[in-house]
Every structure is written in C-alpha cells, then in structure tokens.
Image (cartoon, rainbow, N blue to C red):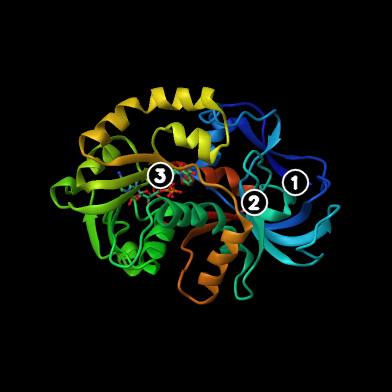
Amino acid sequence: MRAFVLTKYGGPEAAVLRDVPRPSPRPGEVLVRVHAAGLNPVDFKTREGKLKVVQRYALPVVMGNELAGTVEALGEGVTRFAVGDRVFGRMAKAAMGAFADYAAVPEDVLATMPPSLDFETAAAIPLAGLTALQALRDELHLRAGSRVFIPGGAGGVGTFAIQIAKWLGAEVTTTASPRGKALVERLGADVVIDYTAQRFEDHVSGMDGVFDLIGGETLEQAFGVVKRGGTVVSVAALPEPQTALKDLGRGMGLAALFWAVSWRLRAQARKHGVRYRFLFMHPSGAELAELGQLVETRQLTPVIDRVVPFEAIGDAFAYLESGRAKGKVVVRM
Ligand SMILES: NC(=O)c1ccc[n+]([C@@H]2O[C@H](COP(=O)([O-])OP(=O)(O)OC[C@H]3O[C@@H](n4cnc5c(N)ncnc54)[C@H](OP(=O)(O)O)[C@@H]3O)[C@@H](O)[C@H]2O)c1
C-alpha cells in the first residue's frame, strides 16, 4: 500500500512516499481503509525530532495522526464496529500511521462518522477538535458566562476552540491577523484583536481563563490578562509536571524534567496568581462521538483550509509549516 514514511529525523526530505506492507489488525484493533487524513503541526514537529522526549519512534514509521475511512477488517474481540462502517479517529497516543491506504487503529479511539459528513471533513476533526474540547471543558471548565481568551483563533485548533467555547456559553476574545479576522468573527468570536497591529495585553483583562495556541511571548503576556485564581492552558509551549503524570501516564522522572523546563513559566504564572497547565491531548472515541453529534446538529462546523491529493502531501506539509493555515489541511487518499 502507499504510505508517507518517516525515514530519519530532519527536514522535508526526511519523510517520503513509498510502498509498505498493509498492517494487520491486532486484537481490539480495526483495519481502516483510509479515505482522508488530517495534518497537524505535531506531524512536522515529530519529523523534526522535536517530540523525541515524549515519543520516540522506531524508524522507518508511517506518519499521520488522524483519519477517516471505512472499516475493512476487524481484529479479534472488536465489538463496536462492523466491516463497511464509516469511522474517524485520532490514532492511539504512542502510534501514528494515518498517512497510508490502510491503518490499524484501536477501536476505542474510533467513532462512527456522522451521516451527513464526507471523509475529508471527518478527517479534519479528531486531533484539533478533541484538543479544544479537552482544554476548554475539562481543564478550563468553561460554562455560561465564562470569559476566555484564545490567542491564535484562525488555525486548526483555534477554529474549533472558538466554536466549542461559544457552545459552552463563554464569551470569546481571540487574536487574528487581517487574513483571519472575518473567519473568526464568522465562527462567533465576540472580540477580535489584530495581533499584527495591536498588543492584546493593552486591551484584554479580567479573563477567567486562557487557551494559548501560540506559546512564546504571547503566552508570557497572557498570564497578565487572567483574573487571580484563573488558569492558563497552553498546547504550544513547555510541558509541566502534570503533562507527564496526567496526560502521558509517565513517572516522576519525566515529571521532574518537565518541572525544571517549565520553572520560569510557572514562576511567571504564580506572580500573577494564576495556574499554568500544558495539555497533551488524548485520543478518545467517546469524546469524538460527542463532537460528531455537535457537527451533525450544526452546532460545530469544521473549517477546512484545503484538501490536497495524497501524492502532494509534501506540499501540504510545506503549507502547514508556513504557519498561515486557516482551519485544517487534509489529504485525500
Ligand atoms: N499539546 C497538544 O496536544 C496539541 C494539540 C494540537 C495542537 N497543538 C499545538 O497547538 C498549536 C496550534 O496548532 P494549530 O493546528 O491550530 O496550528 P495552525 O493551524 O498551523 O495555526 C495557524 C494559524 O495561526 C495563526 N497565527 C500564527 N501566528 C499567530 C500569532 N502570533 N497570533 C495569533 N495567531 C497566529 C495564523 O494566522 P495568520 O496567518 O493570519 O497570522 C494561522 O491561521 C501548534 O503549536 C500545535 O503543535 C498541541
């Protein structure tokens, strides 16, 4: 079968299209015939070797973290799906493999595709959608009347986050360039700050929480816009001890390392009386089914920047790496 394979850690040349054997589903796994797969910044960060501390793959390995397709075969003990079902999902945490004609996926990370969705749209949902849901609902505990600041609203995660925060009843302030302003407004953002022309810290204050998608100086300034007692959740900065213990299920060794690397950020957060949390999202078929229901009932609309044929996946990577995507980039098999 065709696959996009990571052969070494490095630049664009490190991942290549090649033929590899079709995987066989192990017990509890479903063999999915992939129709579409979503791209995410984690793909090029993995290729560059930036995530080796969290996940080290034996190379060569088929890349890709999320997919939509049809069930081709069932591993032993699979009960939730039947051959021919249309499914979508985020690959298991320590596994990739979505950029291929077939992928073997644990059944518990898959959900049935909403009937109204096409494969490209379904493939755009799992990673970014689950990240936004888990950050806003489970970490920031947004509810009716909450005020949340989401720097970076126009990208893959941001376009889900704005809509999910509105669905939870929150008032949303976000940042976007003039290129993304109309999009984030259409998705429901209440206040939009042009980050290319204004310093958000001069205009935003008293937030209950921040969901940071940018990191760096943006995150450091974001600590100052939250009420004392509030929380700043980032998915784009440095991990902290809870990332190791809660998100990755790892031990005190990695927690201690993350304690050290996040020391300065946590000190800045403490100075403002807020809590810093770095979330590493987790795959979940059950939560994905919730997102599917929101899409089916038109309370959530995935935003797709472009769909690219699988043969041009290198171009899709280059576009995502430019950092300018508006919504999601998807490959069609
Ligand atoms: N920890 C986790 O589990 C997890 C999960 C998902 C994502 N992430 C991380 O979250 C980050 C965002 O992911 P994504 O998929 O949303 O990325 P993305 O789709 O590549 O984001 C691109 C968007 O960001 C906007 N942008 C760039 N710089 C900005 C700035 N300084 N302020 C405001 N907006 C800015 C761009 O708008 P303009 O072109 O208009 O400037 C563009 O629309 C990445 O670092 C990713 O690795 C982590």
Q: Is residue 326 left or right of residue 230?
A: right
Residue 220 location, quadrant: top left
Furthest-left residue in view?
202
Measure the alpha-carbon separation of dots 1 and 3. 27 Å
Q: Does any portion of residue 330 appear in the rendered image?
A: yes
Is there a contact, CB below 8 Å, between mark 2 and mark 1? yes
Q: Hey, what amino acid is under mark 3?
A: Gly
State the separation of the CA atoms marked 2 and 3.
Answer: 20 Å
Badge 2: residue crowd in 10 Å (few <14, some 14–19, many ≥20): many
Tell me the amino acid under the disc marked 1: Arg
Q: Which residue is mark 2?
A: 310
The 10 Å Cα crowd at callout 1, few under 14, some 14 to 19, many 20 or more, is: some
Circle on res. 2: 1
Q: Nearer the viewer, mark 2 or mark 3?
A: 3
Percent position (x, y) of residue 95?
Answer: 66, 40
How far, Cα to Cα, is label 2 from label 1? 9 Å
The image quadrant that residue 233 belongs to is top left
Residue 14, x across and y down, in percent? 61, 30
> Is label 3 in a helix, a strand or a loop?
loop
Position of residue 24 relative to residue 220, above or below, is: below
Amino acid at dot 2? Phe
283 or 15: which is nearer to us?
283
Q: Nearer the viewer, residue 10 or 116?
A: 116
Disc 1 residue: CB within 8 Å of ligand 1: no
Label drawn at residue 323: 3
Residue depicted at x 63% and y 58% = 285
Can you say which quadrant of the picture contains the C terminus? bottom right
First along the sequence among labels 2 and 1: 1
The answer to whether the beta carbon of the residue marked 3 is less than 8 Å from any atom of ligand 1 is yes
Asked which secondary structure carries label 1, the reply is strand
Residue at horizontal 72 percent and vertical 55 percent from the top: 107
